[in-house]
Image (tube, rainbow, N blue to C red):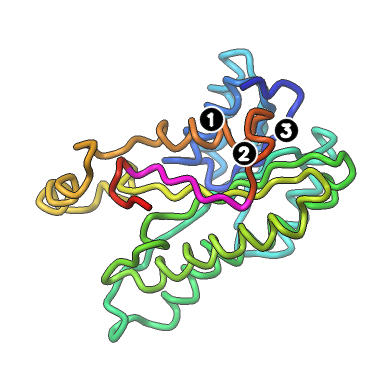
Amino acid sequence: MNLEGRVALVTGASQGIGHSCALTLARHGATIALAARNQAKLDELAAAIAATGGQAAAFPLDVTDEEQVKSSVKAVVSQFGKIDILVNNAGITRDQLVMRMKRADWDAVLATNLTSAYLCIQSVIPSMLKQRWGRIINIASVFGQMGQAGQANYAASKAGLIGLTMAIARELASRNITSNAIAPGFIDTSMTAALSEDFRMNAVKHIPLGRVGTPEDVAGAVAFLASDEASYITGHVLNVNGGMLMG
């Protein structure tokens, strides 16, 4: 999976899955534009990539701000000349039973997890159309496929992201731009670290492979979908869930 000469924009790159995606794509030769709100963490990651011979730069970004998205994409293209790969990874949770969920928590999750992907896709399309090559990879969730009590906002946002993935795949296929989603299962990140040990142990019981996934498990799938080896795959949802959901 040689990504040399490719430029990848990764949102939510400061931690968790996004952090691993950036490192993995860089290891395969891509130049990485790191986007998130935390400047210090982005600078630290850029330095780590540079230390291994890679190239990366930080672009502080609130993905829910349309003008910031537009200006950041312009800055990436200005610095690196293009954007070949977009990884829409930025995401949050605001869990609550739907009967108690505040509208602000619904809006925040939909804005960060779904609307931001639309904004980023819209902004990078001109660069991809120009070179007639592109990879759009959206990080969805198993809960966007099967639902989850207490996560109506999160599940809805991830289900919407899957629908967006397929619509974009149909719109851009003729221009050699693919659009795919990855649906992680239970992944060991800071987002899941706050869960109780009892919850984690019970979750593992429903995973045939018998373990919680790692950010690197997801990052490897991202690198594959970003590569030429995946050139005939579009509109697909790749499950990275240890068998938690099949079919």
Q: Residue sitting at 76 percent across and 59 percent down?
A: 171
Q: Quadrant of the N terminus?
A: top right
Q: Which residues are magenta?
A: 235-241
Q: CA distance from mark 3 to mark 2?
A: 11 Å
Q: Secondary structure at mark 3?
A: strand
In the image, taking residue 196 as reference, residue 245 lies left or right, namely right
Q: Nearer the viewer, mark 3 or mark 2?
A: 3
Q: Are marks 2 and 1 in contact (CB under 8 Å)?
A: yes
Q: Residue furthest bottom?
A: 99
The image's mark for residue 34 is 2
What residue is disc 1 on?
45
Report crowding for label 2: few under 14, some 14 to 19, many 20 or more residues within 10 A (C-alpha): many
Task: Answer with mark 3 or mark 2, whichever residue precedes in sequence.
Answer: 3
Q: Residue furthest right?
A: 130
Given the image, on which type of amino acid does mark 1 rest? Leu
What residue is disc 3 on?
7
* The one of 134 and 234 positioned closer to us in this rendering: 234
Examine the rendered structure and indicate whether residue 27 appears above or below residue 205: above
